[in-house]
Amino acid sequence: KWTTTSIVDETVAAVRERIGNARAICGLSGGVDSAVAGALVNKAVGDQLTCVFVDHGLLRSGERTQVERDFVAATGARLVVIDAVEQFTEALAGVTDPEEKRKIIGREFIRTFERAARDLQQEAGQAGEQVEYLVQGTLYPDVVESGGGSGTANIKSHHNVGGLPEDLQFDLVEPLRSLFKDEVRRVGLEMGLPETIVHRQPFPGPGLAIRIIGEVTPRRLETLRAADAIAREELTASGVDRDIWQCPVVLLADVQSVGVQGDGRTYGHPVVLRPVSSEDAMTADWTRLPYEALERISTRITNEVADVNRVTLDVTSKPPGTIEWE
Ligand code: XMP
């Protein structure tokens, strides 16, 4: 019988057999797929697995804690967190072009991950072992879309954490290869992962960097992070967060408009709310959010986030608009 419990048991057994006594490494993105893949492999081989989380400073509020504290508490997995905030900030300085941002982030991510993998390799080598396996959270739809190939072929390369380099020369372990997203979520809950991870909205690998239209600076990141946290809080509070696919909050950092707050004139930035409904992100419709939720989000953001004096709503479907602005 194909129950969630049997999926877990069978996957764990298969992974245990595959990895044997070798060591494995798993890059966590903060998202549900890599978390569930990591949790399954950890259940199978325990400390033979090391999870790696790169904090590039482009994360949403609370995401690092979710991995550092909640993922570890739920799984007991061995975790290495790499603080790469400065490295990414420097690499992105002065860059405004969306594709350029993506390329830089992808490159720095791979560099960071490779460094972590080498360190781990060295540490393992001293113990007379080898890190042989790389865990990836590839889902069944990804396998189908890439022609059912080895799992390294990947059309939606941008959907994987940094599209890890092949010359790292690990064999891939993909415990979610036969599962759909909803099954992954059920497995995650069964394994005791918290709802905040299991039901997290999709969040792009390049993070908040592609939601700041203009140069990415620490101050702008702080502004967007605060606005995004408020939007998420209010969407959760009004009970609509499960109805939407995701709701990017975009900071128009190069646009300023006049406002009046308190007794004074302001000259601040607008944010855009981009709530979308979708089945697979290939197409999407803008979500008709309740006015009460919009009102609360707008009031709170303009009251609580210093540099923002206007909240706007994106009512474009995909196509013609993509979900993200960059
Ligand atoms: P677009 O903007 O292309 O987004 O309509 C479709 C879905 O993909 C997500 N997205 C990404 N995810 N790395 C990712 O892991 C990326 O570079 C990336 N770009 C977009 C986006 O959030 C949406 O869910």
Image: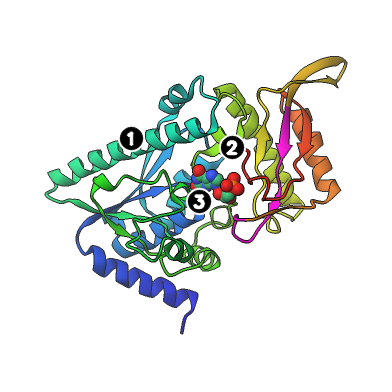
Query: Which of labels 2 and 3 is toward the front?
Result: 2
Q: Residue furthest bottom?
A: 1
Give the residue displayed 43% in from the left and 70% down from the top.
178
Check disc 3 and give the amino acid type: Gly
Colour mapping used in the image:
rainbow
* Residue to which mark 2 is pinned: 326
Relative to 83, residue 265 above or below: above
* Residue to which mark 3 is pinned: 31
Crowd rating for badge 1 (residues with CA inside 10 Å; few <14, some 14–19, many 20+): some
Q: Is residue 203 visible?
A: no
116 vs 280, left or right, is left
Mark found first going from the N terminus, 2 or 3: 3
Check disc 1 and give the amino acid type: Arg
Q: Is residue 151 visible?
A: yes
Relative to 160, residue 226 above or below: above
294 vs 143, left or right, is right
Q: CA distance from mark 2 to mark 3?
A: 20 Å
CB at disc 2 and ligand 1 closer than 8 Å: no
Give the residue displayed 69% in from the left and 51% down from the top.
276
Residue 262 x/y as whole percent: 86, 20
* Residue to which mark 1 is pinned: 111
Magenta span of residues: 270-282
CB at disc 3 and ligand 1 closer than 8 Å: yes
Label 3 secondary element = loop
Residue 294 x/y as whole percent: 80, 43
Residue 134 x/y as whole percent: 30, 53
Compare residues 52 and 106 and report the one nearer the observer. 106
